[in-house]
Image (cartoon, rainbow, N blue to C red):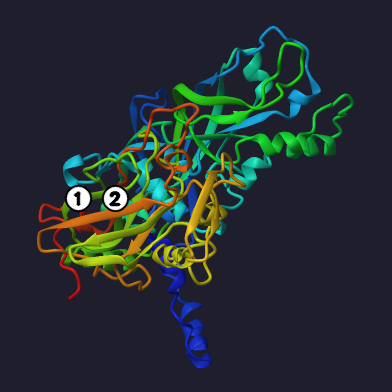
Amino acid sequence: MHSQLNARAKNLPEMGDILQSFERFRKLIPHNDGKRSYKQIIKSSYPTSFNGDSDAKLAITDNEFDITALNDSTIQVEGVAQYRMDTSNPFNTALGTDLIHEATNYVFVGFKSSSQVLRQIQLLINDRPDLCNFLNPNVCQEAFAYLACSSETKRENKPGMYSLYDDVWNKNPFVCGNYICMRDIRRNNGVGSFRFKYLIPINDILAFQALDMFPSSIMGVLSLIISFQFAGAVWCPVSFSAVKEQLQYLGTSFTGYAIDANNIDADLSHEFLQVGTEYGRCYLTTTDGTFLGTHTTMKMNITSFTIEKLKSRLSGYGVNEATKNTMLNDIRQSPFLIPAQKLEKQTFGTGIISSGTFDGTVSITLRNINCISIMFTTHENNITVYRNPMVKDLQLTIGNVQYPPDRISTLTTLNPEFVSDQLQACELDGEIVPSKSFMRSLTNERLIYTIDSAGNANVTGRNTNCISDGTDFMFTIATERKQGGFVFDGLTTDGNVIINLKFTPIASNEAYNPYYNFDTVNYPNKHPSAPTIHFCKDVFWELGIGDDGRSYMLFNDTTLDPVK
């Protein structure tokens, strides 16, 4: 998919000639319809604390402000989570001595994006659900798609909000999650708890991307009924050598440190893993206080969690009476329309057949679809971790139109144009820098192969590890022209249309197919379910005041006709 954030950033208006620029400043500097009252306030949820399977109500605007600046506001969630680490080897709980090499053995557990902790949200206006029709039961999946196509810059240096894999691998502090020492996991026989604190930018919720300013004093208070989950959490081992280097800088002595941290790093898993589903390669301490000679397969599970504090940190300001009255009169005469996006998901009706070849269809009516993304599910519980399936002859057909026109491979050695097509479809071309994880998702080579004289890949094996994280993979096609995210002419059909997806594996030998046989050690007889298709839809908010004087806010995805 693409985000309105990327589209707006790429299509900033031109400043014009020099004279026009100075004329603009002449009008800008003396004009101020605010009250010089920009500030922050904090609102708490009800209830203030609750178990993870409950929900709570939280205000995200306040009529103390004339305008609530949602683009500068966040949701803060704090609590405690309980975990269990499963392992193929027993934990040595009896070993009590602090071993120096254990001080460099860490795992990370958290989220790629803080918004992925959300499960479902419902919007109320003035505590009235009948005045607002917005309910999203699938926030986490939307958050993955939105994050995957966001820029590297957006995700850098924002602790509590985002986790870039390179930061996690090097145990940097500006991540959205926790580092847990394996020594503590070992001593407690694989179980324990950690405290978490996440900051969710309200604009990271897909429907609120363009809702930068909300006229609170006119419309009233917006509240969310929120529920949470850890199904979208990720985990991974952390670099031994990076932790050792940090501790040495801080004065820790490593006398007696008899392991080669670099060799261990090479053997660890080098990617995010889905919590509760995916196994990773870590190291364990044996009964004699040394490490096992090779890695141990482990899986991190979150067994329960409690929310202890849920707050909104709101920014806003006032406007003068003339501006407020003009806004009020305008909204009474005609509702404000604010663009938004919505993600709708379907699963192709057939599963993967034994060879890994796929030919599946869905039938659906399309309306204002700006792009379509395919996610290649391996384990059915994967919702924020998707890898390159290493396929060829990939093509999506909608009606009688093929996307792309020629069948393509996800192995960039065979089809380097696949990368440029994906960057364009996700609005990550031009000056916007895609994240490293997104680029590695497109380019990580999961196969061992040679290219023959005819340009075909002869696969002789599969890579059991990767250089770095590549778990943000999507196959995306654009179906709407790009004009700053403010056009409404996406793909629309008069009725149901047949959508067909076809591909074949690059590896003809099933044993080498990293998609069909995604984990031959821990899930030897398990194969992926059918891919899912996600339609990113142009919708809009309608903010108005009814004849009865009550304000309303509708999430409208049906009535506005596309541009002809």
Q: In the image as oriented, which residue stretches furthest toward the top? A: 94
Residue 88, which numbered label? none
Which residue is under mark 2? 533
- Give the residue drawn at x 66%, y 35%: 267
Residue 4 place in picture, x, y as percent: 38, 62
Look at label 2 and name its amino acid.
Answer: Ile
Q: Are marks 2 and 1 in contact (CB under 8 Å)?
A: yes
| Element assignment for label 2 | strand
Asked if residue 61 can be seen in this view, the reply is no
Residue 416 place in picture, x, y as percent: 49, 66
Residue 362, which numbered label? 1
Residue 428 place in picture, x, y as percent: 47, 65
Q: Could you tell whether 6 is left or right of 477 in the image?
A: right
In front here: 169 or 347? 347
Q: In the image as oriented, which residue stretches furthest toward the front? A: 453
In front here: 53 or 244? 244
Above-or-below relation of 161 to 23: above
User: Could you tell me how far apart the alpha carbons at marks 2 and 1 are, in whole angstroms?
Assistant: 9 Å
Q: Could you tell whether 73 is left or right of 497 in the image?
A: right
Q: Could you tell whether 220 is left or right of 458 in the image?
A: left
Is the residue marked by circle 1 packed among few (<14), some (14-19), or many (20+) residues within 10 Å? some
Nearest to N terminus: mark 2 or mark 1:
1
Is the residue marked by circle 2 packed among few (<14), some (14-19), or many (20+) residues within 10 Å? many
Residue 401 place in picture, x, y as percent: 23, 67
Q: Could you tell whether 55 is left or right of 416 in the image?
A: left
In front here: 248 or 40? 248
Picture quadrant where residue 270 is located: top right
- Give the residue drawn at x 17%, y 76%: 564
| Element assignment for label 1 | strand
Asked if residue 47 can be seen in this view, the reply is yes
Look at label 1 and name its amino acid.
Answer: Val
